[in-house]
Image: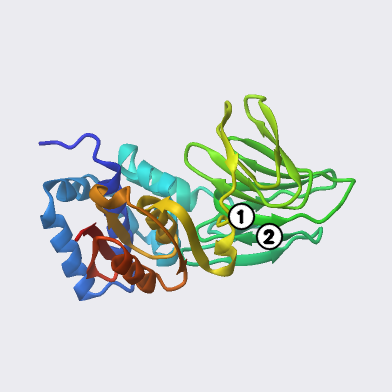
Amino acid sequence: MRLSRPDDAVVDEAALWMALLQSEHVTDQEREAFETWCGADVRHQQVIDQMSGGLRLLRTNALRRVPSQSVLHSVNAPSSRRRFVVGSLVVALAAVLLGRREGWPGAFGELYTGTGERKPFTLEDGSHLTLNARSRVINLFDARQRLLELRAGELWVDVAKEAARPFVVQTEHGLIRALGTQFLVQHGEDSTRLVMLHSRAEVLTRGGVRQVVEAGQSVCFDAHDILATQGTKGDENAWTQGRLEVHDRTLAEVIDRLGNYRQGILRLSPQVAGLRLSGIYPLDDTDRTLLLLQHSLPIRVTYHSAYWVSIDPR
């Protein structure tokens, strides 16, 4: 039986296994865990078979110079993982890893973080920028404007006052023009979210829809329209201090955020994805956070290996 379009979750897991297997740090125990994963579901082996061309690519001389961390960072981005099988893994890896003019992440004008990283930056105008884990920003400042292009992940910015040049954050869905100081921007696959922490900002979608967002408001928009406007919950910027602070959020949301701070697979059962919780958890110690979640919810956390953890009903 040929698998034409596998489930997204299986694609995600297979792509992560592939990145781990080409790493110089893979252990015998992790190889055994991979074999166990392949045998756990017929779809797993089918997806790996579809990716066999990509495995050959990863072993070619052209990619041996690429640090394994760079490959893991690329496949850990959700939009990249989707492209591996649905399109072509070979083409996708070439586009992600080889298509940049300057080579690897860190090219001129690019700011980025890997899994589990947060980085503060002071921009040339004195603005303070912090990137969440697995984030990438292109700095496009020039004499007329201060422009940041958010390609992936999430940023927090405290904008320095400068009347001559507007401060703008751009995503594929539209523009955010600062009318004040502090705000967060989250780049999703299908939409962008702005969380206004202080003063105001103006959103302009690619389709031309405008909205001014006040402090204490959160707006989600895509290229065509404003999708939702709501009040902030007060936990949105806790990550800048290394905390995952949640108020009445689903376990699926929590695990999605936690996944940016952990290499490998965090497999969440749909049966418990909708459980709601509130609490404060450490981002920089994901094992401790998983233990706390297991103690407070009717879930079971199982470590198949350091890179493969499943969360199921207890």
Query: From where the camera sits, is residue 52 visible?
Result: no
Quarter of the picture holding the N terminus: top left
> Relative to 286, does residue 107 appear above or below in the rendering?
above
Q: Amino acid at mark 2?
A: Leu
Q: Residue furthest right?
A: 164
Query: Which of the pair 277/251 is nearer the observer?
Result: 277
Q: Which residue is found at the position 19% from the left and 61% from the top?
A: 314
Q: Which residue is found at the position 75% from the left and 60% from the top?
A: 123
Q: Residues within 10 Å of mark 2 (few under 14, many from 20)?
A: some
Q: Position of residue 162 (x, y in %)?
A: 87, 51
Q: Position of residue 48 (x, y in %)?
A: 21, 50
> Relative to 85, does residue 236 appear above or below in the rendering?
below
- Mark 1 vs 2: CB contact within 8 A: yes
Q: Which residue is mark 1?
A: 155
Going from the N terminus, do you reach mark 1 or mark 2 first? Answer: 2
Q: Amino acid at mark 1?
A: Leu
Quadrant housing residue 251: bottom left
Query: From where the camera sits, is residue 215 visible?
Result: yes
Q: Position of residue 180 (x, y in %)?
A: 78, 48
Colour pattern of the rendering: rainbow
Q: Which residue is found at the position 56% from the left and 48% from the top?
A: 186
Q: Position of residue 200 (x, y in %)?
A: 75, 44
Q: CA distance from mark 1 to mark 2?
A: 7 Å
Quadrant housing residue 223: top right
- Element under disc 2: strand
Q: Which residue is mark 2?
A: 129
